[in-house]
Image (spheres, rainbow, N blue to C red):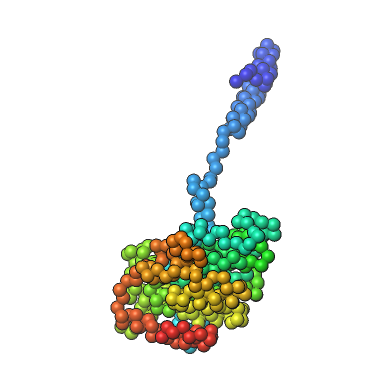
Amino acid sequence: MGYSPIYQNLHVVASSSSSSSSSPVKNKVLVFCMMLSLWVYMIYCCVGYCSTVPGIMLRPSHPHHAQVGPNRTQTRIQSQAHGDPDTQADPLFGGVSSSRDLLNNGDDVDSRGEDWGETRGVWDERVPSGRSNGSAPGESRRLPQAIIIGVKKGGTRALLEFLRVHPDIRAVGAEPHFFDRNYDKGLAWYRDLMPETVEGQITMEKTPSYYVTKDVPARIHTMSPDTSLIVVVRDPVTRAISDYTQTRSKKPDILSFERLLFKNRTLGLVDTSWSAVQIGMYAKHLERWLLYFPIGRLLFVSGERLIVDPAGEMARVQDFLGLRRVVTDKHFHFNPAKGFPCLKRPEGNGKPHCLGKTKGRTHPNIDPQVVQSLREFYKPFNRRFYQMTGQDFGWD
């Protein structure tokens, strides 16, 4: 450290004072002033030094830690996404309690859209003539005009990938979960997730939890009352077992299906708070959608027929969306080992591409009486659903 001007001035003052015959009081005052000046100078030096030292920043050590708050909110919303917390009194739905969600599947491969990764490479060139694979003039991101809103374990992933073969469909692979988990991020955030399209193409997404989430119908209606809505439904008994099977694959120590199904096994009282049961009460959820959309705005696709006759169901979907029937039986090959159809090139060259290993899991053995009890439970819900949709899905 250099010789300070302040210290030099103090030295001069001290020298002059010592040569004079000052009184003891003046000497004490002078010493006090010198000491005070020294302390001020020392503080000044410390402040200058500390300003050069990097500050301590409270930042997360991992990027995900920065989202602790939102993730907690999303977890709470996700726990509601598989079941409606309404407890309205209804002759058919009376006594339904809040959802007891044991099926937290936010990290499923299917949700991230990776289950068909290989297929995307095969069908990426399926574009209208005169347009390249890259961004072209007139392309822009648009809010979806059609949404696959449900249901979980019904066949939504297969339907979306079948539709993505169509040159007039552009769809997000991963599930955005905008209307149930990310609504606070705004429509601009949602639109930015969508693929670029040109005039005449339809933008789509699929999030199966939309169908059973209370606030979603009103939110989609606010975005656009003209949105086309597609629901893939499946025998609710089979759907519940498939739901349970998926959870057990990730949580092997989960309780048995029977233990989770009944509030009282002796009385055969089904626990409607379990989301695996609650999702299959299709009529209950449909009532909420019909408060905002006419029945003609919803198309109900049979998950069973999507397996045995994918081309037939795809014809219905393409007609519903106002599309030419491009995806036909020449695009499908049934895989007996997996038990569901796979996509193939119309020309017949190349190996067909199927759903990944997360699909087609072997269901556990469940007591037939337990299955029958659940089937009896669903009968009134199914009959009401048939009446509301005008379709008999043959589940009884």
Q: Front-most of 3 and 245?
A: 245
Q: Position of residue 340 (x, y in %)?
A: 42, 70
Give the x, y percent position of residue 337.
36, 68
Q: Which residue lies furthest to the top in this view?
A: 19
76 or 367, which is in the foreground? 367
Q: In this view, does 252 lie above or below 44?
A: below
Quarter of the image where the N terminus is located: top right
Image-quadrant location for residue 273: bottom left
How many callouts does the rendering have?
A: 0
For the question of whether residue 44 can be seen, the reply is: yes
Which residue is rendered at x = 57% and y = 70% of the image?
326
Q: In which quarter of the image is residue 135?
A: bottom right
- Can residue 272 be seen here? The reply is no
Which residue occupies 55% across, 42% down?
Answer: 57
**Position of 214 compared to 242: left or right?**
right
Q: Quadrant of residue 195?
A: bottom right
At 53% from the left and 45% from the top, the residue drawn is: 58
The quadrant in which the C terminus is found is bottom left
Q: In this view, does 153 lie above or below 95?
A: above
Residue found 35% across the figure and 78% down from its top? 262
- Compared to residue 66, the image places residue 103 above or below, namely below
Residue 302: give x, y in percent of width and height.
Answer: 48, 78
Q: Where is residue 347 in the image (x, y as percent from the top left)?
A: 50, 64
Foreground: 113 or 336? 336
